[in-house]
Image (cartoon, rainbow, N blue to C red):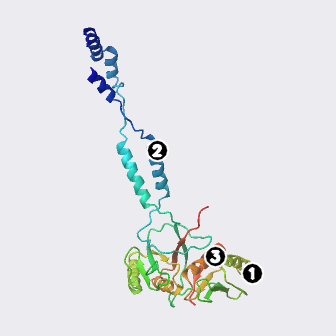
Amino acid sequence: MSESQENRDGKRRRERDRPSHRSSRRRRGGDRGVPIAVNLAPMIDVTFLLLIFFLVTTTFERPEGVLASDLPRVGGTQAVPLPISPIVVRIAQTGPGVDDYTIRIDRFEGRFDRLDALPDVLRRIQQQPGFDRETPVVIIADDDIRWDHVVGCWNAALRAGCERIAFGEP
Amino acid sequence: MRYGRHRRLSLTLMTFNATPMVDVFFLLTIFFMLVTRFSSAEQVPMELPKPADSRAGVVRMPERVVINCRLADVDDPGGRTVLYSIGPNPPRPLAVIAEQLAGLKRESPGLKVVLRADKRLPYEDVRAVMRVIADNRIEVLNVVAHVAEEL
């Protein structure tokens, strides 16, 4: 390395290290010259943990809800007389298959073997004299009827707008 | 000096741009936070009724007890043994369930009962529980079914 080259390098170094008027001002102003960097690593760690947690715990299932109704009242002390003329819906098993059932409504003609038809039938009954939405609906099911069909019957009564639904003993 | 020049070259840093990754992480985390529903421990796995156009609604009940009725083996559709349990507790005979329910009713008179029953159960098995509930002078029954699918 030549002598002039060394001199030039030394001069540059001295100029760089000398506290200039500008740099001291910058320092007083809060080190604005130093780049401020946010350390992202902890945030990425936490986000990644949260992501894994939610990935593992998430289940895409249909949520559960409740249908409220009156229970069958058993025994003399609990028996409350129902208002006159309730609509009594009976579900009976007709065969060995799970869908072999028939639905009949007391005092009304006709049987049907599909729950889809029940809301319309109940709506037609509600339009008859002496019946309305507040007329109690009593569901009476056979012992071997699947619970699924009983709940379906109950839901059909709610779809028909029935406001008082109860279970009855066969 | 040659050595110094080499050192200057080695200072060229390989940087990793984490911004898109953080963006994706945030989006995924927010998505899963919104869609997650934490199932309670008292919701024992079973096949719940799924009525057409379900009118079941999600209701908050502070003072409630959940009674689960399920088949002994979920994978065996022909299985006939019915297990009754209160909340996340192990299965008990129905007589024990009746005693426990009576005790709970004494402690909190405004107790509400939520009945979760497997949809494949015959009605007589569920009705036995309904009788137990009615015997404890709980007249309103809340039965669990799947809510209607949102469009």
Amino acid type of disc 3?
Answer: Ala
Seen in the picture, residue A66 relative to A82 is either above or below; the reply is: above
**Relative depth, front residue between A25 and A114:** A114
For this view, does A110 lie left or right of residue B78? right
Of labels 3 and 1, the one closer to you = 3
* Residue A160 point in image, percent of width and height: 67, 74
Of labels 1 and 2, the one closer to you = 2
Seen in the picture, residue A57 relative to B25 is either above or below; the reply is: below
Instruction: Indicate which disc residue A156 carries.
Output: 3
Instruction: Indicate which disc residue B118 carries.
Output: none
The mark that comes first in sequence, 3 or 1, is 1
Would you name the residue on which mark 2 appears?
B23
Would you name the residue on which mark 1 appears?
A129
Seen in the picture, residue B128 relative to B88 is either above or below; the reply is: below
Callouts 1 and 2 close, C-beta under 8 Å: no
* Residue B93 point in image, percent of width and height: 39, 85
Amino acid type of disc 1?
Answer: Pro
Residue at x-position 46% and y-position 44%: B23
Residue B30 visible in this rendered orientation of the protein = yes
Q: Secondary structure at mark 1?
A: loop
Residue A168 location, quadrant: bottom right
Residue at x-position 37% and y-position 37%: A38
Chain for disc number 1: A
Amino acid type of disc 2?
Answer: Asp
Mark-to-mark CA distance, 1 and 2: 65 Å
